[in-house]
């Protein structure tokens, strides 16, 4: 990159920054306040979503445990029935 390109890049950057300051619709302090307000709102929204996801995960884990216990009971009953059938034939 030669010196002319660097000069024009810096001049464009300075001109853009100056225009942005001239045409900014509100003060920096007000804009930072709005950004902070929205950030707090998003943080609350994300916290509620995380709590909902946690409750859903707990519910799914409980359902999985119940299903595993039902499957285990079914297998135990099948094994016992097989043992009884075997003993009756012997």
Image: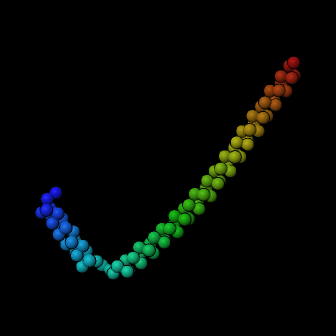
Dividing the picture into quarters, in which one does residue 3 lie? bottom left
Task: Report the colour scheme.
Answer: rainbow
Horizontally, residue 11 falls left or right of residue 33, namely: left
The residue shown at (12%, 63%) is: 4
Dividing the picture into quarters, in which one does residue 36 lie? bottom left
Q: Nearer the viewer, residue 11 or 80?
A: 11
The residue shown at (59%, 62%) is: 51
Work out which quarter of the rendered image holds the C terminus and state it. Answer: top right
User: What residue occupies the far top of the structure in this picture?
Assistant: 90
Horizontally, residue 14 falls left or right of residue 50, namely: left
The residue shown at (22%, 75%) is: 19
Q: Is residue 7 above or below residue 65?
A: below
Horizontally, residue 36 falls left or right of residue 70, namely: left
Work out which quarter of the rendered image holds the N terminus and state it. Answer: bottom left
Q: How many marks?
A: 0
Query: Residue 76, how many percent across, how many down?
Result: 78, 35
Query: Residue 16, how many percent across, how many down?
Result: 22, 71
User: What residue occupies the far left of the structure in this picture?
Assistant: 4
Query: Residue 9, how many percent across, how many down?
Result: 18, 65
The residue shown at (37%, 77%) is: 31
Horizontally, residue 58 falls left or right of residue 85, namely: left
């Amino acid at each position: 990159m030669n010196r002319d390109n660097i000069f024009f890049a810096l001049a464009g950057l300075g001109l853009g920054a100056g225009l942005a300051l001239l045409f900014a619709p509100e003060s920096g302090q007000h804009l930072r306040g709005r950004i902070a307000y929205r950030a707090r709102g998003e943080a609350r929204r994300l916290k509620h979503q995380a709590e909902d996801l946690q409750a859903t995960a707990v519910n799914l884990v409980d359902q999985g445990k119940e299903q595993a216990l039902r499957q285990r009971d079914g297998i135990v009953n099948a094994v016992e029935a097989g043992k009884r059938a075997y003993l009756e034939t012997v």
